[in-house]
Image (cartoon, rainbow, N blue to C red):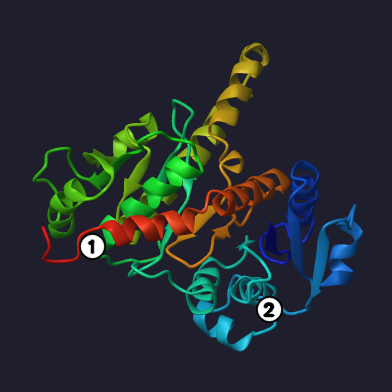
């Protein structure tokens, strides 16, 4: 198996991506990596060369670049070349922590959309209080969606949760303003009966306040609501940890209490640590494309590589296509 990794994308590039790659090569003997980026800048961090190919380029897409224009004009950018390795069958999957919009554009225009899927969706895994996490789909690839898109999201998310995350009969929920069947805007009202008939374990409407309690394994929504939810969860977690730290360090007594609570606080942090869940999969493409968090450290990159590897091994793309093909055509009962 061979993965193409954009070494120049992200806040901590190229050190963090390369450190994650080195760890993955040590952990997975069947893994080969094509590392795409500036060889001179990458060289200090390469601790081994076995099963590693360097694809040199000095061009990269910046976080401030307009995504589609950048993909079309910067044809030698590391992110673009990583996607081309997949398109030309020299790699089975690719991943990057770079410009999210550019990676989505490269995935759509270069890797290509799979048959039967109208719009690809961005799907990160978020932590839950029970520790198993849930897949949020869509988290921002499509600001507007049609009811049939949500059905496709549900199928893609369900297949991924079962094949990669090992969840037996994944529970699929629809993000809504209430749990009653008739709740929501027109999109949710139209999607609800379609999801009930879809080949997934649909558990109905789910409120945002319940998602971190593990009420579902896959949460389906449009990209606008999904992105708002994602950023709200991230911002809330950062704010709570910041306030907690401030209070625990506010006095000698609280510092002593913090010392006593240190093991429990570490466990809590580990349970909520995004770096263990990998990146956000761009589902609906002909091959796995993973978007690692922009601030990913080596562990987060390692998890994203493991995620891409598992998607390839479990043939997630093929399973999604098979499930879509087995669905009745519009108008059939």
Residue 78 at x, y = what percent? Answer: 70, 73
**At x 64% / y 53%, what residue is drawn?**
295
How many neighbours does mark 1 have within 10 angstroms: few (below 14), some (14-19), or many (20 or more)? some
Quadrant occupied by the N terminus: bottom right
Residue 319 at x, y = what percent? Answer: 43, 54
Q: In the figure, is residue 19 to the left or right of 328?
A: right
**At x 17% / y 54%, what residue is drawn?**
194
Q: Is residue 97 or residue 106 the one in the foreground?
A: 106
Residue at disc 2, secondary structure: loop
**At x 13% / y 50%, what residue is drawn?**
193
Q: Is residue 111 or residue 73 the one in the foreground?
A: 111
In the image, residue 129 sits, relative to residue 14, either above or below, namely above
Distance between mark 2 and mark 1 Cα atoms:
35 Å
Residue at disc 1, secondary structure: helix
Q: In the figure, is residue 203 to the left or right of 116?
A: left
> Can you see residue 328?
yes
Which circle marks residue 28 in the picture?
Answer: none
Q: In the figure, is residue 29 to the left or right of 129?
A: right
Sequence-earlier tag: 2 or 1: 2
Which circle marks residue 77 in the picture?
Answer: 2
Which circle marks residue 148 in the picture?
Answer: 1
Residues marked 2 and 1 touching at CB (< 8 Å) = no
In the image, residue 299 sits, relative to residue 139, either above or below, namely above
Residue 86 at x, y = what percent? Answer: 62, 70
**At x 44% / y 27%, what residue is drawn?**
129
């Amino acid at each position: 198996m061979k993965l193409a990794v954009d070494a120049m994308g992200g806040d901590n590039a190229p050190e963090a991506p390369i450190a994650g790659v080195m760890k993955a090569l040590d952990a997975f003997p069947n893994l080969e990596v094509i590392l795409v980026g500036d060889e001179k800048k990458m060289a200090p961090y390469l601790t081994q060369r076995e099963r590693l190919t360097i694809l040199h380029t000095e061009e990269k897409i910046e976080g401030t670049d307009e995504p589609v224009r950048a993909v079309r004009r910067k044809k030698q950018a590391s992110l673009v070349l990583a996607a081309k390795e997949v398109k030309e069958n020299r790699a089975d999957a690719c991943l990057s922590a770079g410009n999210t919009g550019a990676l989505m554009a490269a995935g759509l225009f270069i890797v290509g959309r799979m048959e039967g899927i109208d719009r690809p969706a961005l799907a990160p895994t978020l932590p839950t209080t029970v520790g198993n996490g849930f897949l949020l789909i869509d988290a921002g690839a499509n600001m507007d969606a049609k009811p049939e898109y949500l059905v496709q999201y549900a199928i893609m998310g369900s297949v991924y949760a079962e094949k990669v995350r090992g969840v037996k009969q994944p529970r699929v929920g629809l993000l809504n303003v209430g749990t009653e069947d008739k709740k929501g805007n027109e999109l949710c009202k139209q999607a609800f009966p379609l999801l009930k008939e879809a080949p997934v374990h649909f558990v109905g409407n789910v409120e945002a306040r319940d998602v971190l309690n593990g009420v579902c394994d896959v949460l389906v929504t449009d990209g606008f609501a999904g992105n708002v939810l994602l950023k709200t969860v991230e911002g809330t977690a950062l704010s709570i940890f910041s306030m907690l730290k401030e209070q625990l360090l506010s006095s000698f007594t609280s510092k002593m209490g913090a010392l006593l609570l240190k093991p429990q606080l570490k466990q809590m942090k580990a349970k909520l640590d995004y770096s263990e869940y990998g990146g956000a999969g761009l589902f609906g493409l002909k091959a796995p494309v993973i978007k690692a968090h922009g601030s990913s450290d080596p562990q987060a990159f390692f998890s994203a590589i493991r995620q891409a590897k598992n998607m390839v091994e479990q043939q997630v793309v093929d399973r999604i296509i098979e499930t879509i093909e087995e669905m009745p055509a519009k108008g059939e009962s």
